[in-house]
Amino acid sequence: MSKEKTTSRTEKSKREKSPASKGDSQRASGGEMHQIAGGGHPALTTNQGVALSDNQNSLRANPRGPTLLEDFILREKITHFDHERIPERIVHARATGVHGFFELTASLKRYTTAKVLTEVGEKTPVFTRLSTVAGGAGSVDTPRDIRGFAVKFYTKEGNWDIVGNNIPVFFIQDAIKFPDLIHAVKMEPDRGFPQSATAHDTFWDFISLTPESMHTVMWIMSDRTLPRSLRMIEGFGVHSFRLINEAGQSTFVKFHWRPKLGLQSTIWDETVKLCGADQDYHRRDMFEAIAAGHFPEWEFAVQLFTQEQADKFPFDHLDASKLIPEEWVPLKVIGRMVLNRWPDNFFAETEQVAYCPANVVPGIDFSNDPLLQGRLFSYVDTQLSRLGSSNFHQIPINAPKCPFGNQQRDGHMQMAQPAGRVAYEPSTLSENSRREKAIDGFHSTRVNETGEKGRIRAESFADHYSQARQFYLSQTSYEQAHIASAIVFELSKVEHVHIREAIVGHLRHIAEDLAKRVAAGLAFDKMPDAPPVASPVKEMPLSPALQIIGKMKDTLMGRVIGILIADGSEGADIKKFKKAATDAGAAVKIVAPKVGGVKLADGSMLTADGQLAGTPSVLFDAIVVILSGEGAKAVSGESAAIDFVRDAFVHLKAIAADKGGQELLKIANVGQDAGVVAVSDKGAFMAAAKTRQWDREKSVRTLA
Ligand code: HDE
């Protein structure tokens, strides 16, 4: 191979030095590229290892004649290109994947034999994929949608996947309903829209006929589905799993990820505009954070409980539409996950990674949650068609990092080359062949299953409203208003009045106040009837842990401050804010009418990070406006400048402005409140930038 490379390079350099032949001159700029690529680079070859002499022109019968079928180089390249795409995931197609590690900080030895959960200080490599659910691979990052939160732990005892979401509950109780749910939420089959949105008839039609979805509906109508950053979402394993200890005893467990940066969401109008400003908003945010060395981190926590405790819950923990409030079974933090390495190749890693809830290691086992049981089948099945071969576990991103092997053989794209004549077990013919491990191998929990076989939904699954009510009532008044307004928005996109009415009927079981707000927002002249309930609604204690606002952190870490400037802006003020923000852990971006920069008051030049027209304030958590009188006049005729400050205000963000900045605010009709401060009051700005100005909202929009 290396000999061939050398030969081809020698030949090429000989030709490049020789006077241009007729053929060479017709290669035009291609010839030039060959020269540039020539010195020292390895040869470009076909997939058979043959070096190419020309990657710019196909083989033609004459310079203006037909292309020849003989051109094996053209055919190979085009054929490979034609097959570059593989089927995208039927759900969770759009995602961001990052490498990192998990470090155990507290041992669960009492509960499990899984070494990943017992060896304190051990760092286990992980690959984490954060996704939206409904949209295709090319859809935007910021629809109203649940986020998938899938973590593959490459443990010393095999791969363990927690394939969870950023919401702890799910719409349905039985896997048999999943295709219906997904067909209802995806674009409608006759018209091919809407892409990645719940605000349409088929989704709400299905929901109106599926009361078990009401709890999850409350969550998706909250701002949890509008995350500010993938670094600021929680993650949940959703189902109950089991931990098994050395004595074979089983303890139920729920898995939780809690972001170090705290929870942070956008608001609806901001999200809508973000879709236009940056379709890759979340992917870019993660990429930039990793590149800057600001590695996102999550605490890993468990809720542990026994069968006896579970028997006393007023709900069934095997029902994935229910959660166990943190106030009842506290979270025990046992580790942390740090994401610190962007993949080398998006397709090879983020696209080809194959998660599966059935990937567990000895010491971890499944519960009887019927949704989980269905998932245990679905993931490998879908991966067989998505990745095209039963050998997908050999792809580097999927392969365990511990030794592994068995007597499975052959199949499409087999990369391994097992030697010897034995492909079965047990055998006497091969002393070193792999054998089962009776003690350390994977054991299923021993449980007695009794009862009647049938297509039966357990009675303990019948309560569909109590936890939905608990969720709504546990929110702050701002969050309740956002939930009510989101439902009004969504149902306003639903054409069929009977569907709108049916949903409001369900809401009456959750909270009459919520139902009334939504009914008023839809201009109903009378309240629809509530449907009959299978189980009476129970009053549950409030759970503040369900709020977003309650879980925000008083920090600027991970946030981005935008500073709008123009010719004549005061450099000292820009510097002051830049320093304060970066000292507090935020990133700063300078926005100017031209990306090349501006001439500051002292005559020096400052380049911008973004051009005003392409860098709206939705991209920032708070803004600073530093303008000279002239600068203010110059930008006030630009709608992008007006929108910049106006949007920051209506998205409840902190604004600092100097005298020129204030002029722009006046022209843009931006009001004054505690979140709009003078440039001289840096401290007030820094405090206001950590949160949103919730009280401002009633002055800028009518909420339900
Ligand atoms: Fe999934 N889900 N799911 N799901 N799911 C898939 O597997 C499925 C469910 C989740 O980043 C698919 O490889 C069924 C709950 C995540 O690659 C598929 C049911 C939760 C991801 C599938 C559910 C999830 C998937 C599509 C109902 C949260 C993305 C591509 C029984 C606990 C993983 C693939 C990644 C992906 C099936 C419900 C999370 C079709 C049948 C509940 C994060 O196999």
Image (cartoon, rainbow, N blue to C red):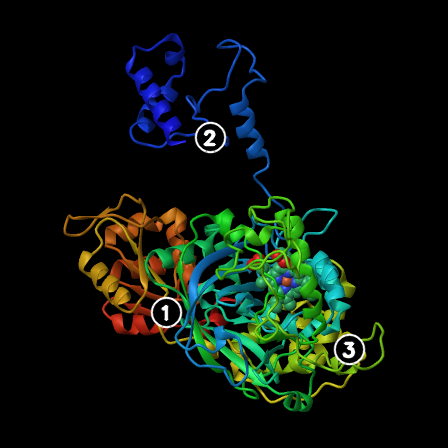
Query: Alpha-carbon distance for marks 1 and 3?
Result: 44 Å
Q: From the viewer's perspective, is 106 left or right of 588?
A: right
User: How dense is the environment of label 2, judged by Cα within 10 Å: few (below 14), some, or many (20 and up)?
Assistant: few
Amino acid tagged 1: Gln
Question: Callout 2: helix, strand or loop?
Answer: loop
Identify the disc placed on residue 542.
Answer: none
**Between residues 258 and 77, which one lies in front from this camera angle?**
77
Mark 2 = which residue?
Answer: 49
The answer to whether the residue labelled 1 contacts the one labelled 2, judged by CB atoms less than 8 Å apart, is: no
The part of the image, by quadrant, that contains residue 8 is top left
Q: Residue at x 46, y 51 (%)?
A: 278
Q: Which image quarter has ligand 1? A: bottom right
Question: Callout 3: helix, strand or loop?
Answer: loop
Q: Position of residue 542 (x, y in %)?
A: 58, 87
Q: From the viewer's perspective, is 227 left or right of 39?
A: right
Disc with the residue nearer the chain's start (1 vs 3): 3
Identify the disc placed on residue 530.
Answer: 3
Whether residue 172 appears in this view of the structure is no
Q: Quadrant of the N terminus?
A: top left
Q: Residue at x 37, y 69 (%)?
A: 672
The part of the image, by quadrant, that contains residue 553 is bottom left
Q: Nearer the viewer, mark 1 or mark 3?
A: 3
Question: Callout 1: helix, strand or loop?
Answer: loop
Amino acid tagged 3: Ala
Q: Nearer the viewer, mark 2 or mark 3?
A: 2
Q: Position of residue 317 (x, y in %)?
A: 66, 81
Disc with the residue nearer the chain's start (2 vs 3): 2
Mark 1 = which residue?
Answer: 672
**Between residues 189 and 123, which one lies in front from this camera angle?**
123
**Between residues 513 and 74, which one lies in front from this camera angle?**
74
Q: From the viewer's perspective, is 644 left or right of 224?
A: left
In this view, which residue lies farthest toward the left? Answer: 602
